[in-house]
């Protein structure tokens, strides 16, 4: 039994096709099939039901695949262990990032990190928080950047920064004339929200008066913050934005940004990873670089005064 054979089995299980699996593994289809047959012969079982289309796992095959994932996950840690001992930061690193963070944060640190560590390959994936947690637990993802706290077993959270939220209020809106917005000013029927499943939606609702949330139908929601801004500009209401997203708005839209009085709605953004992750050098370097590009622009410590945003938006 070899690790290569197990990798071939997982590829076929994923693609349900020997030819596609062979392409993914950069081998010929006969080579892949022969290695899987050798494994089946050694175990005296059939892992795949080849008579079905697409190919299916047998009952015992499902258990073999589950165990193969564990074995391969542990085997990969061997090279990680050696790299850590040598203080090397190189190879592929997969990072899942939630949609309301990826467009603003990743462009800020990506080039700096690649320049500092040219032998690394950052694989950035846009994912929802639940999906990131699942892939971290399964070992299919090295790190995640999400809003915390999550209180997930076996998941380590390392705070990167604290990001204030701001209101986006177009000129036609009744609150546009106010320089600072208070919690009591908000009308839930008038707030455009992200769709269910986005943690930023929950951040907004948690800030609103809970008495006003009961039985209130939310007429308009979207999966994209840019869409919410467009809807607000069309007169459908106001919305919330993360502060970094607000800073990226076109200049003609930045005049519609309003900050909040205390308590300022703020989200905690963290780097998360499974406690079995051995890539500590990468983790420390990534945190250092992210915080260095954000310093002076956003809050890196919860004790900073979030009622006085550091962002330089036009008045």
Image (cartoon, helix red, strand yellow):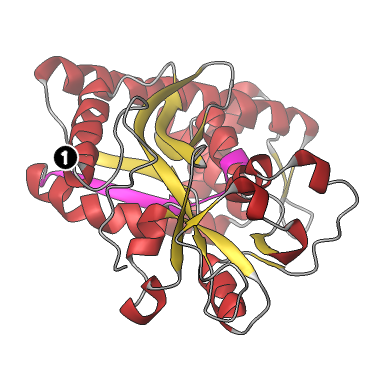
- At a point 42% along the width and 16% down the height, the residue shown is 276
- At a point 26% along the width and 21% down the height, the residue shown is 280
Is 107 left or right of 135, judged from the image as shown? left
5 or 291, which lies in front?
291
**Would residue 26 be seen by someone viewing this image from the given angle?**
no
Residue 256, located in which quarter of the rendered image? bottom left
**Residue numbers of the magenta segment:** 118-130
- At a point 18% along the width and 23% down the height, the residue shown is 83
Residue 295, located in which quarter of the rendered image? top left
Image location of residue 245, percent across then percent down: 40, 60
134 or 25, which lies in front?
134
Element assignment for label 1: helix
Is 196 left or right of 169, judged from the image as shown? right
255 or 79, which lies in front?
255
**Would residue 257 be seen by someone viewing this image from the given angle?**
yes
Image location of residue 298, percent across then percent down: 29, 44
Whether residue 295 appears in magenta in the rendering, the answer is no
Image location of residue 291, percent across then percent down: 22, 37
- At a point 66% along the width and 60% down the height, the residue shown is 193
Q: Which residue is mark 1?
A: 292
């Amino acid at each position: 039994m070899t690790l290569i054979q197990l990798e071939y089995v997982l590829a076929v299980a994923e693609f349900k096709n020997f030819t596609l699996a062979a392409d993914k593994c950069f081998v010929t289809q006969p080579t892949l099939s022969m290695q899987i047959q050798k494994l089946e012969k050694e175990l005296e079982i059939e892992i795949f039901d080849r008579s079905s289309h697409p190919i299916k796992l047998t009952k015992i095959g499902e258990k073999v695949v589950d165990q193969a994932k564990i074995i391969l996950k542990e085997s990969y840690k061997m090279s990680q262990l050696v790299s850590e001992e040598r203080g090397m930061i190189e190879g592929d690193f997969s990072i899942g990032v939630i949609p309301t963070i990826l467009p603003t944060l990743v462009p800020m640190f990506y080039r700096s990190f690649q320049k500092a560590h040219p032998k690394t390959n950052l694989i950035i994936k846009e994912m929802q928080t639940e999906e990131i947690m699942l892939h971290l637990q399964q070992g299919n993802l090295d790190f995640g950047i999400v809003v915390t706290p999550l209180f997930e077993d076996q998941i380590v959270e390392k705070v990167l920064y604290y990001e204030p939220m701001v209101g986006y209020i177009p000129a036609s809106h009744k609150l546009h004339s106010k320089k600072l917005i208070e919690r009591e000013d908000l009308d839930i029927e008038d707030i455009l929200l992200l769709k269910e499943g986005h943690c930023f939606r929950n951040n907004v609702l948690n800030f609103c008066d809970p008495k006003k949330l009961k039985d209130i139908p939310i007429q308009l929601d979207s999966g994209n913050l840019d869409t919410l801004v467009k809807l607000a500009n069309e007169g459908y209401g106001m919305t919330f934005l993360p502060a970094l997203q607000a800073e990226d708005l076109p200049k003609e839209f930045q005049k519609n940004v309003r900050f909040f009085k205390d308590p300022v709605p703020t989200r905690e953004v963290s780097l998360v990873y499974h406690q079995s992750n051995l890539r500590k050098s990468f983790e420390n370097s990534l945190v250092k670089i992210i915080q260095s590009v954000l310093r002076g622009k956003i809050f890196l410590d919860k004790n900073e005064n979030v009622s006085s945003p550091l962002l330089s938006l036009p008045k």
